[in-house]
Image (cartoon, rainbow, N blue to C red):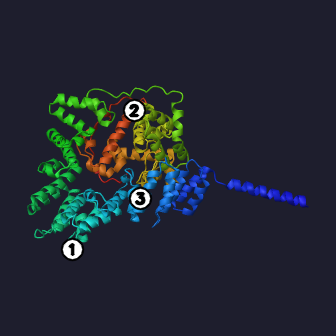
């Protein structure tokens, strides 16, 4: 009996041990659990994970997550614990991120001695830390901080809360004056940044600033505000709100705004009159109003900056007024006029004006550059695209020697920790030579991590591998879905490369998902049209589902708008906006693209069409130049306006 009892006891102990071993997390699972605990700010779970993974190669992540979670608790500073992290992990790529979290905690605690000792140039890339440093410098009576604080005040950007004590102190001492406040209010109103408007307004004495009801009326019903305007009221608040209402009216009806301003402008100072016309001209060009160039002509250069000179140049370009285009470009700063866009259009203007020698010099230099404008310049000279020469073949150990440098990134990638893995790849990639960037790209490609392969090869200088730069990832799935929706596969390849660099798990700040970066509303709309009855939002990151939904939506846009350029722009910003920009007359597509009023969309269309031209070569499609591919926008009939817009891509 004793023997049987002993056997049973041993068996129970064995089963308990086996169960314990089965339940014990692997290091990878423990790391994932720690990451989940960090997102939940679960400090007890992180403390447990920190002990379990103390000897893991990625243990610095776990300790960073733990300390970051603690530092975000009110009143927590953790000086000794953070210093222990730096001593234990002197080469950790997380050091700067932890130092930023620590500096914010020190700033909240007003511990300026420790704060000053820990500030580094890298940490001053964080706006909140910058503002805490200004607090520290003013506390120590560093007068140069006043200059830097005023620069932030006039930056036209909403600043972190840590800047508020700085601005309040300077306003109390009249270093930020009433004139400064009104100037900032005009800047904020001019950009329709109502959050910044209300913040600047809070610095004015009661009943002297902008009234909330009047601000709302000027913003939402500008025509009504202007109709009720009383010329006898010359207060600063009424002046600024009138100019704001004028700008808001011009965003929809620039001619009506111009007519209104013509009738009331005499009641304003000459400078305010010019400012009003500037708002009308800028908003008019955003809508391609043919009078925009006329409105720009009377505006003094003192009111212009490079961004507004760019809009003046586009107003001239819409009218194909080459003399005024050249004047606008020549009035830009050297840094602005030296950008590829303005170098190309300056060459076009010079050529149209008969100054062929000058145009040739600009086009020749630009044609050596590998981008949209470079290819346009090359084709204007009669050339055509040819791929760069392939670099020398790899030696037997070039990739293998480099791999240990990327082991952390690769492990995080395999675990699906995407921001962390991409960050690690970026850090490991940063100091490499062009040849090593090429090897890193080959390593990422071997791991089927295509977006990092593109990231590295784009930094490889003259060591360009065309296949790595323009990969054919997911070719079978992409071809199938493109053909299913009567789309040219090279166009879809060009779009996917621009949208996600072929990263299936890509997620934008606005919530767009997957290879074709579909917004949730777009994905649901497309899924209903197919229909995919079992569709869930999480399925959007599945390669085939994403391509199925994205190509269906792109086909819808092409059918609705009738032109690949318009459909490409609409994929980024929605069809109804695009329809507002299209003339009912044929237009050179290069001019249409250049005058797209949203800079992100303009750049997007240029990149997609450049990529498409390159992918035609990669896929052996019939050769079409970029110029032939973009062609002429034939115009859209008015009956197409206000069509249903299922979604707007970011």
Farthest residue in the right direction?
Answer: 1
The label nearer to you, 1 versus 2, is 1
Image height check: is 590 above or below 84? above
Q: Residue furthest bottom?
A: 206
Q: Earlier in the sequence, mark 1 or mark 2?
A: 1
Quick one: label 3, few (<14), some, or many (20+) residues within 10 Å?
many
Horizontal side, residue 325 vs residue 467: left or right: left
Q: Residue 103, which numbered label?
A: 3
Q: Quadrant of residue 365?
A: top left
Residue at 22 percent of width and 37 percent of height: 345
Residue 19 or residue 265, whichever sits in front: 19
Q: Quadrant of the N terminus?
A: bottom right
Q: CA distance from mark 1 to mark 2?
A: 64 Å
Nearer the camera: disc 2 or disc 3: 3
In the picture, measured across the screen, residue 452 lies left or right of residue 148, that is right
Q: Is residue 134 left or right of residue 80?
A: left
Q: Is residue 595 visible?
A: yes
Q: Which residue is mark 2?
A: 616
Number of numbered discs on residues = 3
Front one among 614 and 449: 449
Q: Residue at x 17, y 48 (%)?
A: 290
Earlier in the chain: of badge 1 and badge 3, it is 3
Name above or below for residue 540 compared with residue 400. below
| Callout 3 secondary element | helix
Q: Secondary structure at mark 1?
A: loop
Depth order, front residue of 642/207: 207
Q: Position of residue 646 (x, y in %)?
A: 39, 54
Q: Given this view, does label 1 or label 3 mark the residue nearer the observer?
A: 3
Disc 2 is placed on an element classified as helix
Residue of label 1: 207
């Amino acid at each position: 009996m004793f023997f049987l009892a002993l056997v049973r006891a041993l068996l129970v102990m064995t089963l308990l041990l086996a169960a314990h071993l089965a339940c014990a997390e692997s290091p990878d699972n423990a790391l994932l659990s720690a990451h989940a605990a960090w997102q939940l700010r679960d400090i007890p779970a992180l403390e447990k994970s920190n002990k379990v993974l103390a000897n893991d190669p990625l243990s610095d992540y776990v300790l960073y997550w733990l300390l970051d979670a603690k530092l975000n608790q009110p009143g927590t500073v953790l000086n000794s614990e953070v210093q222990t992290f730096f001593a234990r992990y002197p080469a950790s790529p997380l050091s700067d991120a932890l130092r930023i979290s620590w500096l914010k905690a020190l700033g909240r605690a007003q511990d300026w001695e420790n704060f000053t000792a820990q500030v580094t140039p890298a940490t001053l890339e964080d706006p909140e830390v910058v503002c805490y440093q200004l607090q520290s410098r003013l506390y120590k009576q560093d007068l140069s901080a006043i200059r830097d604080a005023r620069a932030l005040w006039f930056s036209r950007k909403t600043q972190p809360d840590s800047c508020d004590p700085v601005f309040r102190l300077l306003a109390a001492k009249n270093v930020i004056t009433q004139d400064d406040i009104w100037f900032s209010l005009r800047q904020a109103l001019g950009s329709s940044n109502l959050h910044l408007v209300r913040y600047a307004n809070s610095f004015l004495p009661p009943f002297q600033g902008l009234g909330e009801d009047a601000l709302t009326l000027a913003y939402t019903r500008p025509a009504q505000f202007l109709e009720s305007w009383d010329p006898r009221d010359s207060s600063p608040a009424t002046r600024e709100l009138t100019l704001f209402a004028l700008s808001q009216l011009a965003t929809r009806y620039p001619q009506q705004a111009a007519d209104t301003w013509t009738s009331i402008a005499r009641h304003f100072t000459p400078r305010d009159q010019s400012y009003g016309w500037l708002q009308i001209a800028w908003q008019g060009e955003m809508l391609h109003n043919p009078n925009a160039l006329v409105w720009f002509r009377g505006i003094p250069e003192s009111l212009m900056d490079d961004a507004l000179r760019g809009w003046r140049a586009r107003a001239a370009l819409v009218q194909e007024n080459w003399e005024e285009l050249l004047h606008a470009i020549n009035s830009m700063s050297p840094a602005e006029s030296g950008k590829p866009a303005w170098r190309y259009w300056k060459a076009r203007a010079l050529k149209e004006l008969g100054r062929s020698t000058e145009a040739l010099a600009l086009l020749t230099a630009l044609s050596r550059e590998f981008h949209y404008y470079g290819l346009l310049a090359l084709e204007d000279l009669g050339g055509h695209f040819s791929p760069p020469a392939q670099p020398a073949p790899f030696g037997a150990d070039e990739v293998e020697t480099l791999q240990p440098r990327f082991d952390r990134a690769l492990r995080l990638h395999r675990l699906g920790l995407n921001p962390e893995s991409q960050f690690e790849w970026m850090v490991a990639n940063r100091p490499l030579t062009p040849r090593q960037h090429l090897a890193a790209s080959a390593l990422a490609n071997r791991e089927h991590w295509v977006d990092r392969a593109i990231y590295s090869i784009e930094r490889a200088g003259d060591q360009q591998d065309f296949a790595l730069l323009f990969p054919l990832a997911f070719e079978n799935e992409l071809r199938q879905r493109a053909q299913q929706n009567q789309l040219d596969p090279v166009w879809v390849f060009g779009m996917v490369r621009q949208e996600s660099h072929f990263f299936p798990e890509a997620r934008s700040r606005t919530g767009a998902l997957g290879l074709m970066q579909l917004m949730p509303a777009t994905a649901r709309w497309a899924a209903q049209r197919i229909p995919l009855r079992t569709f869930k939002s999480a399925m959007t990151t599945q390669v085939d589902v994403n391509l199925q939904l994205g190509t269906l939506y792109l086909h819808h846009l092409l059918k609705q708008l009738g032109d690949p350029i318009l459909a490409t722009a609409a994929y980024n910003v929605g069809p109804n906006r695009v329809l507002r920009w299209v003339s009912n007359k044929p237009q050179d597509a290069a001019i249409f693209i250049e005058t797209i009023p949203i800079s992100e969309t303009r750049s997007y269309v240029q990149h997609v069409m450049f990529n498409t031209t390159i992918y035609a070569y990669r896929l052996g499609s019939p050769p079409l130049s970029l110029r032939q591919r973009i062609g002429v926008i034939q115009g859209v009939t008015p009956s197409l306006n206000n069509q249903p817009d299922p979604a707007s891509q970011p």
